[in-house]
Amino acid sequence: MPHATATPAQPFAIREAVTRARCVVLDLDGPVARVFAGEPAADIAREMLSLAAHDGRPAPGVRDTTDPIAVLHAHTAEMLRRDRDPGWRRTVDALHDRLDAYERKAAESAEPTPGAADFIRACHASGRGLSIATNNHADAAVRIVERMSVRDCFDGPVVGRTGDATLMKPHPRALLEAMRPGVPAGLHLMIGDTVSDFHAARQIEMPFCGYHRHERGRQRLLDAGVPLVASEMGEFLAFVAAADR
């Protein structure tokens, strides 16, 4: 198994990806901030699972998950499988409301990713378009970048999940909406920290660079076929500056 560290060719390849990009699309949780730093995601997932169980509508395959996004996706998929059964619809709506509220609260204690704000400012100063494509609620994303004092750097949209959680990444909807009109996907660059991010970008042939602060997370990206994986957002910052010299 390859070790999740940069190869000698990787810095040059990341520079090439950044140099080519006219627009950068960022995932929120990871590259920009730790959304649930102050509101543990596992606690939220357990509360959502308890809500669904109380309704008598537990979705299969997520009983032990600690990911609230996975809970929402699984219950939405089950509702659709049941032809939008009204009871399941009520449960899914309640799960949406619960997660939306938690994410808005979590935005107030989210921890900015080191180097993210500097990277965002550098991209903006270089004339690159900036947008966000996240599986989190758009309100939470907007509040987080406001707290980081970089909201004005995003000339592109902040795209969050819709009422249909099956359209979250790896579905490419969010990336398609985050793209700058008239600019081909190949002249964008997405930076994300999950395999779902990578698969969404690959579906529309958008160049992708991975980021993860943990080695295990970097290894997951490498194992999925992500060719470029950084361990710090500062790695990208260096290449924005270098590309513009």
Image (cartoon, helix red, strand yellow):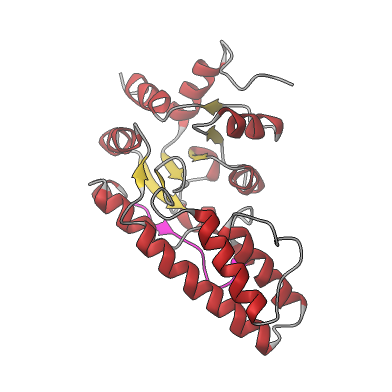
Q: Is residue 121 magenta?
A: no
Q: Is residue 158 magenta?
A: yes
The residue drawn where x is 33% and y is 52% is 109
The residue drawn where x is 55% and y is 79% is 93
x, y percent for residue 234: 38, 26
* Closer to us: 120 or 110: 110
| Left or right position of 4 against 153 | right
Q: Is residue 55 visible?
A: yes
* Closer to us: 160 or 185: 160
The magenta span reads 155-165
x, y percent for residue 127: 30, 37
Residue situated furthest top in the rendering: 8
x, y percent for residue 220: 66, 34
* Closer to us: 180 or 101: 101
* 150 w.r.t. 7: above or below: below
* Closer to us: 130 or 79: 79
* 33 w.r.t. 221: above or below: below
| Left or right position of 50 against 97 | right
Q: Quadrant of residue 241?
A: top left
Quadrant where the C terminus sits is top left
The residue drawn where x is 42% and y is 62% is 103
Q: Quadrant of residue 33?
A: top left
Secondary structure mostly seen in the magenta stretch = loop
